[in-house]
Image (tube, grey):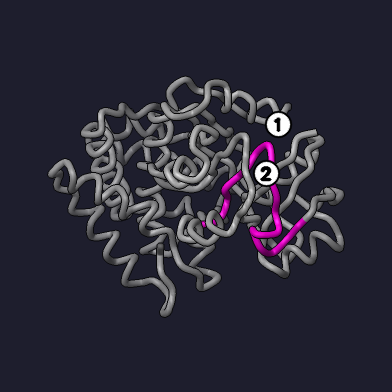
Amino acid sequence: MTSVVVLGGGALGSVYGAWFAEAGAEVTLVARPAHAQAVNRDGLCIDGQPPVQVRAVSSPGEAGDCDILLLAGKAFDNPELLSGYPGTARAAFSVQNGVRQAEPLVARFGSAAVGCVSLVGATLGEAGRASHSFDGPTLLGDLSSTAPGTAAAIAQALPGRKLEVHNDIAPALWSKGVLAAAAMGVVGLTRLVYHQIFLSPETRDVFYDLACEGASIATAEGVELIDGHGPFQIRSLTQQSRQNAHRRLAAVGEAMEAAGQTQVRVSILQSIDRGRPFEVQAVFGDLVEIADGHGLDVPTLRAVTRLLTAAMPSGVSSR
């Protein structure tokens, strides 16, 4: 039986934790106290289905060694989660945002760390309950520092789920990172639900500018974006004219509206709703720092980073 520790058992961590448990793993969920208490009392309930039995704790110090460790908290919680976890892991992956999301795991777990791109959506409801809001795939790949076959071992522990193992995970990591910066930047500043940012010429403009600036950083890093999953096809979008990009983005918004996907609240909007900090550094700040290292001009990305930092709830930090 596989043992799994989920550091950061919020919405996404709960969904993955339930999946591992359903596959027969012994799962320890490190979550906020109220959520942990409800899970231990009533089980972990996803999408109103019968509860799954997992062990839940409120401190990473209460979790022990494991076969697979999943880092699923917000990026600014990494120092507390990782320094507080005393155990070892044979494999470790992160479903966090940001092009540098694997680096904290490499620093902590060395050759056990792999790269991961999660296109799964989740929302946390009342304590002990979460919903699986978007059924995208999970992409895994060994890094240059990874023990060969580690990503494949993680995939084998989740049979029946949408998992892909990539020989080179960098293009997928950067493609998601660029898309996240464009989408979360516009949503974070406007507070609009997802489909609405594609229905207005003004918000489409900013989305396109952010995506193109992100693509220029990827190119400078020697990474070619890909047209992966979902409707955006970020590589093609950033290579099109602004006029053609507007048409494609408008079609995305109209298709979402026609399909009734009108209440999609991306993670930054969920944080805003709860008065919690945003992942400004991981999603935006790291890209700006990499751009600066290459001497690139990224005015829209830099402005969005500054504005979201200024909009952070009083007394909290994005790190």
Q: Name the residue under label 2.
A: 16
Q: Is residue 242 above or below residue 195?
A: above
- When the figure is inspected, residue 305 is found, relative to residue 211, above or below; the finding is below
Specify the quadrant of the image occupied by residue 259. Answer: top right
In what quadrant of the picture does the N terminus appear? Answer: top right
The image shows residue 317 at horizontal and vertical percentages of 41, 69
Where residue 158 is drawn, which disc sits there?
1
Residue sitting at 42 percent across and 39 percent down?
A: 176
Question: Reading the chain from its start, which is encountered first: label 2 or label 1?
Answer: 2
Secondary structure of the residue carrying numbered label 2: helix
Q: What range of the chain is rendered magenta?
A: 56-74
- Residue at far bottom of view: 314
Three-letter code for the amino acid on which mark 2 is drawn: Tyr
Q: How far apart are marks 2 and 1 (CA)?
A: 9 Å
Tell me residue 172's x, y (percent). Answer: 43, 31
Amino acid type, label 1:
Leu
- Secondary structure state at the residue bearing disc 1: loop
- What is the quadrant of residue 174 in the picture? top left
- Left or right: where does residue 317 sit relative to residue 84? left
Q: Position of residue 113 (x, y in %)?
A: 52, 36
> Quick check: 156 left or right of 270?
right
In this rendered view, identify the residue nearer to me: 87 or 258. 87
**In this picture, residue 231 sits left or right of residue 73:** left
Q: Is residue 193 magenta?
A: no
Quadrant for residue 302, please give it.
bottom left
Figure check: 318 above or below 87:
below
